Amino acid sequence: MKLLQRSLVARIVASLLAISAMALISIVVTMAVAGGSRGDAAAINVAGSLRMNTYQIVAALQRYERTPSMEHQAAVHVLKRRFEARLQSEELTGAIPVSEAHDLRRQYRLVLSHWHNELAPEVNEAVDTRSVNIESLNRALDGLVSEIDQMVSQLEHNTEAKIRLLSALQILFLGLTAVVVAIALYDIRHNLVAPLRQLMVLAREAARHNFTVRTRLKGADELALLGRTFDSMAEELGTSYADLEDRVKRKTRELERSSEVMQVLHDGSRSLYGGGNDLCTSAAPMLRQVAELLDIGPIRLSLNDPHDNRQVPILATHSARRPDYCRDHDCHACLIAPRPLRLSNTENGDCVLLPVSVGDEMLGTLEIWHPKGERLSDSVRRLLNALADQLATAVYLQQRIEEEQQVSLMNERTIIARELHDSLAQSLSYLKMQVARLERMQAKDAPRERQAAVFDELRTGLNSAYRQLRELLTTFRLKLEGPGLQTALLQTTDEFSERMGAPVELHYDVPPHLLNPNEEIHLLQIAREALSNIHKHAQAHWAAVTVRFENARILLRIEDDGVGLEDGDSPPMHYGLVIMRDRAHTLRGELRLANRPEGGTRVEVTFTPQTARLITRQPAETTTLHNQGN
């Protein structure tokens, strides 16, 4: 019974088994009743034929009485035996109940008694005496026929009773089956169909992300248990889905905030990298926007002083006072805005200290305050690390730019000093010696002819010094006004083309940023000195300057179609050629001077640039730096 209460499947199986059992019982009962009624029709026919047989016996007796003969007597005996055979036949006795208390059995006994006690003696007596007592025979015949009729009626009533019993049983089993089917349908409707509909509604709503629907099924069967499980699952899914939606919203807000911060970092990188050494102007607005977007602050930046190893505060967003080294008191970028952040008393909050470093070089620290007890998310930490790296890169690049500017300034001063020493200083020394010579000659009252020769040398020396000064001024002006060696050489070739009245070609094929300023100055000076010699001595109608980089070396070639050298080599004491050889030696290169086969002169200078020599001398170190950079 408990199983039927707990299991819907058990109830459905029980209903099917009950219906099947009733159908089986109905079939068995029907077969049994049908089997019991199988001989009733034959028995009624036999019982009905007994009446006809009695009348045939009486008619045969009457014929025998009118015409006594053996044939008629035999006919009477045949009819008598036939009557007795039918009366005791299996067809008739088989339809009569065995119980002696049954009315049909008693009626059958009465028919036998009437035959054996009344009609049969009358027939025997009539056969023996050959006389028929019609009245006595008719009375006996009427009584027997009456009993036979009553037996036939009882047989019919018995058969009808069996048919009624069969109909009643069919109706009973049909009614029971209908009741069981009705109960099963009710159970299926209320405990199967309705719960399934509720489960389908819950599943459909769950597919639409609506987890508020509940089946609220009661009972102990499978669907009720399944409904409660689905309710629990829907509740858990609703909680999980709400939690996931909340997490997605938080992540979306974080991503949006991170995107805004990255946009601020990207926009601030231009002013940060191009703002010079004024971090207050370039970095403070970016740090303020980052602090407002991430709801943190203040943010304080301190840089290391390389001389005494101390932290120097540079700037602080949302600060109550200016930094100690503030240079512009009209700027309010560091001070608290009219709407300060939530964290008003930062000393009660938590602080994150990030290093501002490039590689192993520690440049400073970035101090970031945030509300106490609130843990910074991983995305916020990554953004703050990116901010620290960006500040470190900007500071490092600015320091390197300042160092490069100082080195460039020193190199430029060294180059100017070298050029003045190699040209103008030597000329002035020569003039100084000539002045001392002239003073001694005047002190000794030397003849004016000898003094005139000294005056001529002084005039020539002054003109040469003035010319060298103009050359230096022209060279430095070209260098300062032009973006590189190619522009300076182009201006130089244009200048000498006008001075010579002949075309001066320029062929330049050198990668950018290959030569340092010192090398560019020396190449420019060698080219100008060679073109000046062509202008003065070559009587040329064409000249060309070629600068090419090949086989890791720089080739400078100056050619002309002039008169050339007398002996195919350079004059040993020519001052300009000495200067050019000294410059080539300074470049650690080689100067070659020769006549061209086509006519004219060719001057060639070849040397290895400083960068190429560094690559040649330090391949292992360069490879190590390259691997570390990767």
Image (tube, grey):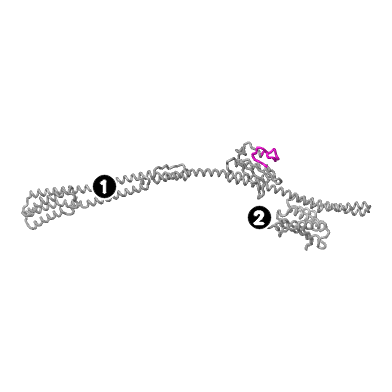
The N terminus, quarter of image: top left
Magenta segment boundaries in residue numbering = 313-333
Identify which residue is drawn at 24% across, 51% down.
Answer: 34
Neighbourhood count class around disc 2 (C-alpha, 10 Å): few under 14, some 14–19, many 20 upward? few
Residue 483 percent location from the top left of the image: 73, 51
Q: Is residue 329 magenta?
A: yes
Q: Pick whichever, 325 or 73, lies toward us.
A: 325
Q: Which residue is mark 2?
A: 626
Q: Give the image quarter of residue 603.
A: bottom right
Q: Which residue is mark 1?
A: 169
Q: Quick one: SS at disc 2?
A: helix
Amino acid type of the residue that numbered disc 1 sits on in the rendered structure = Leu
Sequence order check, earlier mark of 2 and 1: 1
Q: Pick whichever, 186 or 373, lies toward us.
A: 373
Residue 442 percent location from the top left of the image: 92, 51
Q: Is residue 204 left or right of residue 500?
A: left
Q: Pick whichever, 115 or 221, lies toward us.
A: 221
Residue 511, labelled with which disc? none
Q: Is residue 23 left or right of residue 196?
A: left
Q: Quick one: SS at disc 1?
A: helix
Residue 561 percent location from the top left of the image: 79, 60
Visible in this render: residue 137? yes
Residue 241 percent location from the top left of the image: 50, 44
Question: CA separation, marks 2 and 1?
Answer: 106 Å
Amino acid type of the residue that numbered disc 2 sits on in the rendered structure = His
